[in-house]
């Protein structure tokens, strides 16, 4: 079993192995984060090696591993030396974004086709909208092999740098790293708190900031009191906010279709009242969770013992 094996549900962070991770983070924070990055590299290799393409759960898991690697890369940028690790975060971000070039189109199409199973008139109207939807003309997603080729060397170099820092075990370096991590985590939290409870139009941005905070905090679940509870709430918020964002995109597709195609206005008049109510309810659920996230994040000490 690895030091941080992945939880079975794929939603939480990798779980600690049996006694393999130090309970005292200050013993070797660099070594701890090297193992965290190693876990993401191992996960990516397992998902991408020999695969011809990615879809479904595998695609989701690759995106999560890229997010985790990118979040820690941002926290550690410039350690131990100026400029160290600066390329890993942007590379992980760019690969993740390139993996789903037509996600919005696919989600809107699927939601419209499934929304009215027992309403024949609205189902027919939804199908007419779907028939007019044009897939975005974007570049093909990177292959699994290309992901490993692009990210593997960067991850390997970063892991080696952190291991070397851990082996040197210089107390002043560890203290400097802990101070850097604390400052960057507090800055990340401040960006979220400054947003406040989002309006419907701000839910997507709020969701992005919660993701940044979640993936930055995951390696420190045992060290910062209250982190475990906050992470659970952040995951619930992400699910609710993702649903709300998708529903807003469906509404936007219908409005654009009605503006672009005069004959589509009847379908929009039939569908939009229902879909607008869907979006409003999803936004209200997200806002309730956002209040809880803000309260829990505000109370978090965000300092290491």
Image (cartoon, helix red, strand yellow):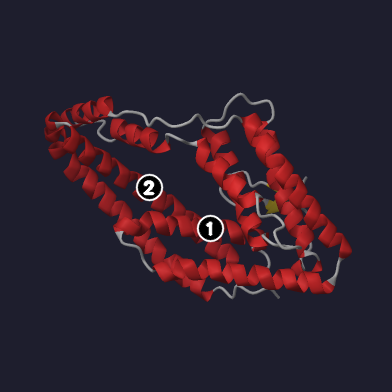
Q: Front-most of 80 and 103?
A: 80
Residue located at (30% from left, 30% from top): 113
- Residue 233 in the image: state x and y as whole percent: 49, 60
- Residue 224 in the image: state x and y as whole percent: 64, 70
Q: Which label sits in the foreground, 2 or 1?
A: 1
Determine crowd level at label 2: few under 14, some 14-19, many 20+ residues with C-alpha closer than 10 A.
some
**Residue for badge 1:** 212
Helix, strand or loop at mark 1: helix
Numbered marks: total = 2
Helix, strand or loop at mark 2: helix
Res 186 quadrant in image: bottom right
Horizontal placement of 10 versus 291: left or right? right
Quadrant placement of the N terminus: top right
Looking at the image, residue 171 lies above or below residue 139: below
Looking at the image, residue 86 lies above or below residue 247: below
- Residue 2 in the image: state x and y as whole percent: 77, 47
Mark 1 or mark 2, which is nearer the start of the sequence?
1
Q: Front-most of 291 and 209?
A: 209
- Residue 293 in the image: state x and y as whole percent: 46, 65
For marks 2 and 1, give the CA distance.
18 Å
**Residue for badge 2:** 243
């Amino acid at each position: 079993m690895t030091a941080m094996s992945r939880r079975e549900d794929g939603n939480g962070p990798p779980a600690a192995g049996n006694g393999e991770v130090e309970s005292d983070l200050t013993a070797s924070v660099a070594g701890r984060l090297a193992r965290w990055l190693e876990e993401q590299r191992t996960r990516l290799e397992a998902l991408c090696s020999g695969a011809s393409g990615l879809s479904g759960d595998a695609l989701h898991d690759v995106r999560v591993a890229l997010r985790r690697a990118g979040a820690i890369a941002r926290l550690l940028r410039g350690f131990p030396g100026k400029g160290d690790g600066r390329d890993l975060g942007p590379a992980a971000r760019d690969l993740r974004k390139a993996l789903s070039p037509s996600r919005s189109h696919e989600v809107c199409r699927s939601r419209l086709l499934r929304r009215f199973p027992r309403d024949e008139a609205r189902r027919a109207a939804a199908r007419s909208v779907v028939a007019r939807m044009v897939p975005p003309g974007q570049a093909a997603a990177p292959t699994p092999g290309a992901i490993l080729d692009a990210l593997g060397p960067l991850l390997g170099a970063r892991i080696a740098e952190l291991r070397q820092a851990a082996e040197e075990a210089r107390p002043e370096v560890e203290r400097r790293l802990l101070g850097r991590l604390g400052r960057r985590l507090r800055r990340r939290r401040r960006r979220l708190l400054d947003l406040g409870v989002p309006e419907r139009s701000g839910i997507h941005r709020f969701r992005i900031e919660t993701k940044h905070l979640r993936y930055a905090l995951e390696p420190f679940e045992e060290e910062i009191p209250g982190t475990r509870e906050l992470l659970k709430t952040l995951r619930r918020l992400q699910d609710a906010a993702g649903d709300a964002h998708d529903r807003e995109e469906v509404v936007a597709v219908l409005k654009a279709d009605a503006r672009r195609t005069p004959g589509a206005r009847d379908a929009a008049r039939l569908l939009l009242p229902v879909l607008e109510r869907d979006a409003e309810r999803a936004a209200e659920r997200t806002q309730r969770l956002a209040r809880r996230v803000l309260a829990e994040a505000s109370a978090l000490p965000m300092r290491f013992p």
